[in-house]
Amino acid sequence: MKKLAILGSTGSIGQSTLSICEDFPDRYEVVSLAAGRNLDTAFAQCQRWQPRVVSLATAELASALKRRLLQAGLGFIEVVHGSQGTVRVATLPEVNFVVSAIVGVAGLEATYAAVCAGKTIGLANKECLVAAGDLILSAARKHNVALLPIDSEHNAVHQCMRGGKPAEVRQIWLTASGGPFRNTPLADFEHITPEQALKHPTWVMGQRITIDSATMMNKGFEIIEACRLFDLPPAKVRVMIHPQSTVHSLVEFIDGSILAQISVTDMRLPILYALAYPERVDARPAVPPLSFDLAALSELDFAPPDLTRFPCLRLAYEAAESGPAAGIALNAADEIAVAAFLEGRIPFLGIPRTIEEVLSETSSAVPTSIKDVLAADEAARICARRVIARHGAAVRT
């Protein structure tokens, strides 16, 4: 039985993971949870799963949860908080599999600590490898830790690569739905509202990742993540717009063969693949079922992305070529810019404009520790706020 720590248990990936645990109680045991700021959901998860340790974002939230647990007769559950609390959740001796699903660099320290503690990682956090890929992969090699991708695209590549050796790979193709604006006239992009950008045509996700999908920065992060995970240069990681979201990724081998992974658009499938690896388990206990209707293959569209329409994709390729510092700045600037867009402080195209300015002001210094990564991340955030404020002042004058 695999004993799980779930970082980001109240988010969509965390809740899908718990759904799998419901379906396969003989295979997976929930040991610890990191639940962020969602107190009510954290309490409900504690009632259902009775983890040994649960972490919340702040001391105040942890105290509130502790009071509720005592009243419910669940005082034996240890409640911790903050980044150190998340590290504790990820490194408990009983845990042997960590699902890393906290959005942003908030989950970086715990994921790195889990790798150093020898835990297998189910990685749903793109930002960990975008910001600190070299450090995490070096630690994974040192401690003989498997990093199993949960993102549907990288999970698909991982599955396809089982059909050949890494040296036999010519290139990989990451598919993208194109988001809600793949056919929107470019003249309308300046007037896109947060409400429009939050209406993703395929996936139900959190706010930041939904906006990142609309700008295609999400796919940009996936390019960098794929370079790290599969040891490929950016030129060998291609992107293709595929609005049906049926083919999740493809791998082309040097003999011309192409393997594609096809499945329903349900995140439980890649999560189950990662949890069960190297086995495959019968998914039929899942409700609704994860089986695929072949009639969905009657229409498959593919087209290269328009980098003029999606400048964030261009910026991600440039950052992938530039090195680790650019990856840190790319992620940090995007997070600040997306928040500013959602708050109505910058327009939709202000997101790539902000990121490009931050990248232009970023040094090429290579971080040698997680502390260095977090310091560079904070510097990029400060720079992004300064850029946004400067443009806001220019607009007002």
Image (tube, rainbow, N blue to C red):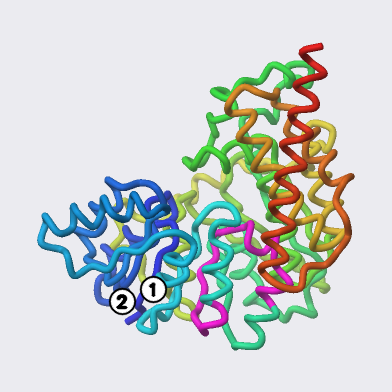
Q: Quadrant of residue 384?
A: top right
The span picked out in magenta is 115-137
Name the amino acid type tagged 2.
Answer: Arg
Is any atom of residue 242 visible in this view?
A: yes
In screen coordinates, is 170 left or right of 114? right
In screen coordinates, is 340 left or right of 29? right
Q: Judge whether 145 appears above or below 250 on screen.
A: below
Can you identify the residue that label 1 sits on?
Answer: 281
In screen coordinates, is 127 left or right of 8? right
Q: Residue at 72%, 81% (x, y): give it.
A: 165
Residues at circles 1 and 2 in contact by the CB criterion of under 8 Å: yes
Q: Does the magenta-highlighted stretch encompass residue 132?
A: yes
Circle 2: element type: loop
Can you identify the residue that label 2 sits on?
Answer: 27
Viewer-side residue, 202 vs 289:
202
Q: Judge whether 20 appears above or below 121 on screen.
A: above
Q: Residue at 64%, 43% (x, y): give it.
A: 335
Q: Quadrant of residue 21?
A: bottom left
Q: Which mark is in front, 1 or 2?
A: 2
Viewer-side residue, 364 vs 64:
64
Return the x and y of residue 178 as percentages of the image width and height.
Answer: 67, 37
Q: Judge whether 265 appears above or below 25 on screen.
A: above
Name the amino acid type tagged 1.
Answer: Val
